[in-house]
Amino acid sequence: MQETAWWQRGIIYEVYPRSFQDSNGDGVGDLNGILQRLDYLVKLGVDALWISPFYSSPMADFGYDVADYCGIDPLFGAMQDFDRLLQEIHNRGLKLILDLVPNHTSDQHPWFLESRSSRENSKRDWYLWRDEANNWQSNFGGPGWEWDDFTGQYYYHSFLKQQPDLNWRNRLVRTAIFQAMRFWLARGVDGFRVDVIWLMIKDDQFRDNPPNPSFRPGQPSSHRFLPVFNSDRPQVHEVVSEMRAVIDDYRDRVLIGEIYLPIPQLMAYYGKDLGGTQLPFNFQLLQTAWTAEALARAISEYDDALPAGAWPNWVLGNHDNARIATRVGSHQARLAAMLLLSLPGTITLYYGEEIGMTNVPIPPDLVQDPAEKNEPGIGVGRDPERTPMPWDSSPLAGFTTGRPWLPLGEDHASLNVEKSDQDPESILHLYRTLIALRRRHSVLVTGELHSIAAANNVLSYERRGEGERLRVLLNLGDAPIPIPSAIGEILAATSPCCLSERPNGLMQLGAAMGLIVRLPAEKYATNGTSSREGRFS
Ligand code: NOJ
């Protein structure tokens, strides 16, 4: 394979730490719990863990409200637990990516306590204080400005009022967060996933956002205005390149940006001369309608838009979006796995997708997510995709010995890791097979995407390079489709009964089934270089 960095060829696995494995019976997952499950991840075949925040926090937004960037919340463990976890991760040849939350702190962070203590305080300007509120909204519902009686001004919060936004135009704020990054980098972490990186700089004139003409009642209130002046401001790229410079002071680290933007704006986060985030998260598969046509269009659009030298990446799920098996159904979730693991570049998986976990309905009295509490019943809640990982068939699924912080799925006795492990036809085995295939056929990582097409509910594309030519065929429809009998050597199938013979001797690919086949070598004259290398030239 061409020279690639670990974060280019690797598969990243997101662990939502509250829900992965509890080690002390308090019903909430923790660092020692993750440690207990590392060998499961090794067997799955992933390369890196991204762990959502475990810093000291009042947990108003479950850790995305940080009160100390260099401390571990006791709920998750202590610094020695972290050090041991990191060591064990590295001992297994895995990498660790932390979640950096630089856009806002907790309102209990000492910086904010100082900032709100008086208008004259030296940290007053570390946050966004104004005499008057404009129309910027909070992403969790309602106005984004909170009145502070004590000092007689408003402060801005993109999320909860317990999450005041930092002022990234202030040089000292930058220095302070960069110091926190260095603290973890020096300890040995392999990179950061940066929370809401596209929101970090706001308009310096605090202009009102224009109304959103497509807003309809029943949508989240933050959709009432178009986020023109409080997101994706041009100056944000300067901050991103400074963060990248911090990363580049250490060997072999990665900077990943959380960015929900249309493709052209997203691409800008690779940065000028590619000095931005190495991986601006690509959420196309989270946002595209599940049809062959829409997926083909999204994949082509993304691939075509990649700047020279930019490394692609694909994400299928995360802690803010409905699980794939709920979005597309459990049969199609197998196709989704094949799609994800046959696309170029870096892959990010969300915990539990590999066993086909679905969203768990949460009764109103058990709701935890502040987004749902603020705007109930309109579908913004994220608890359903954050429920505990079911490890075995015991009453509490091997997740905890206490009361789980969110309910386990009703199907946990039948759908869990232990059962999936024993069933060679489970989606877990399919994930392991596809991950191993990706490792063996580096064309799946580095090769060029060709012939992306959609017809009769079938999505197909080729991967070419590294002396190989593979074709991926995904039948998203609910009827079998005929395929040529000499289609090539089958490398992977979403299920053992994918292919059947028709009376006329032709073959057919079953409904909701997919294949990866190797086309005969003579049909493909390679020049010996992979296409991604081509992009670099
Ligand atoms: C994005 C995170 O993914 C989400 O979970 C969190 O609530 C917000 N940022 C606020 O930090």
Image: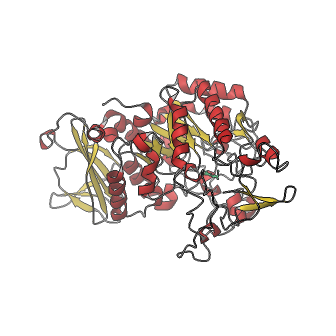
Q: Position of residue 290 (x, y in %)?
A: 41, 62
Q: Position of residue 526 (x, y in %)?
A: 17, 38
The colour style of the image is secondary structure
Determine the residue positioned at 39% across, 45% down: 312
Q: Is residue 470 left or right of residue 110?
A: left
User: In the current view of this chain or complex, which residue is farthest to the right?
Assistant: 150
The answer, for residue 404, to whether it is visible in the render is no
- The quadrant in which residue 100 appears is top right
- The quadrant in which residue 217 appears is bottom right
- The quadrant in which residue 452 appears is bottom left
Count of numbered tags: 0
Which quarter of the rendering shows the N terminus?
A: top left
Q: Is residue 481 left or right of residue 271?
A: left
Which quarter of the rendering shows the C terminus?
A: top left
The answer, for residue 335, to whether it is visible in the render is yes
User: In the current view of this chain or complex, which residue is farthest to the left?
Assistant: 522
Q: Position of residue 502 (x, y in %)?
A: 20, 60
Determine the residue positioned at 70% across, 56% down: 157
Determine the residue positioned at 54% across, 38% down: 242
Q: Position of residue 497 (x, y in %)?
A: 32, 52
**Front position in the image: 126 or 260:** 126
